[in-house]
Image (cartoon, grey):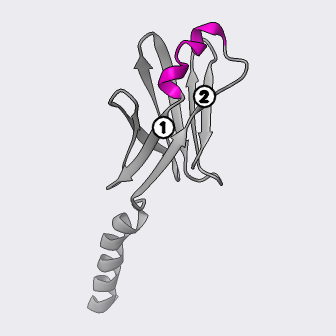
Amino acid sequence: MTIAKYVALAVVALALPSAVQAQDAEAKFWLKAAPNNIQGCIAADPQFTREHTFTLKGGLAEVSMPGNIHVKLKLTQPNIYADDFVLGRLNLHMIADLAATPKTLTVTEKSLGCKWSAIKQ
């Protein structure tokens, strides 16, 4: 290999991490409760049935919820972010699917089976 090829290979290798990093994005969601949620879940509806904002900035994903609650999400698949969090006595799992058309946000309660979901506005 010539020096020019090594230099070109090094430039490509250095550029890959920034090319792979997701673009910054923001999406607003209004969650709705699943119609079959049990009574214990319905009590949490006021927290979930208001505006939630998904923000992706510098490769870090976060959902801002009413009450100044911020949930950090991890990249689990290309354009899909998820993580678990606790809110009161609820053990929740949140998924922001930016790969779907339209984009979706889903919150499920692990023990009770409650679910809230939304599509991007």
Q: Residue at x 51, y 21 (%)?
A: 46
Task: Tell me: residue 18, above or below residue 113.
Answer: below
Number of numbered discs visible in the structure rendering = 2
In this rendered view, identify the residue nearer to me: 56 or 68.
68
Give the Cα separation between the discs numbered 2 and 1.
Answer: 12 Å
Decide: few, some or many residues near mark 1? Use Cα within 10 Å; few <14, some 14-19, many ≥20. few
Q: Is residue 111 visible?
A: no
Decide: few, some or many residues near mark 2? Use Cα within 10 Å; few <14, some 14-19, many ≥20. many
Q: Position of residue 67 (x, y in %)?
A: 35, 26
The boundaries of the magenta stretch are: 38-48
Q: Which residue is mark 1?
A: 51
Task: Tell me: residue 14, above or below residue 87.
Answer: below
Q: Position of residue 40 (x, y in %)?
A: 58, 8
What secondary structure characterizes most of the magenta part? helix
Task: Tell me: residue 110, above or below residue 53.
Answer: above
**Image-quadrant location for residue 31:** top right
User: What is the quadrant of the N terminus in the image?
Assistant: bottom left
Q: Which residue is mark 2?
A: 116
In this rendered view, identify the residue nearer to me: 8 or 19.
19
Q: Amino acid at mark 1?
A: Glu
- Which element carries disc 2, helix, strand or loop? strand
In the picture provided, is 52 more to the left or to the right than 103?
A: left
Q: Is residue 41 visible?
A: yes
Q: Position of residue 7 (x, y in %)?
A: 28, 84
Q: Residue at x 34, y 66 (%)?
A: 18
Mark found first going from the N terminus, 2 or 1: 1
Mark 2 and mark 1 in contact? Answer it, CB < 8 Å.
no
Q: Residue at x 32, y 56 (%)?
A: 58
- Which element carries disc 1, helix, strand or loop? strand
**Image-quadrant location for residue 65:** top left
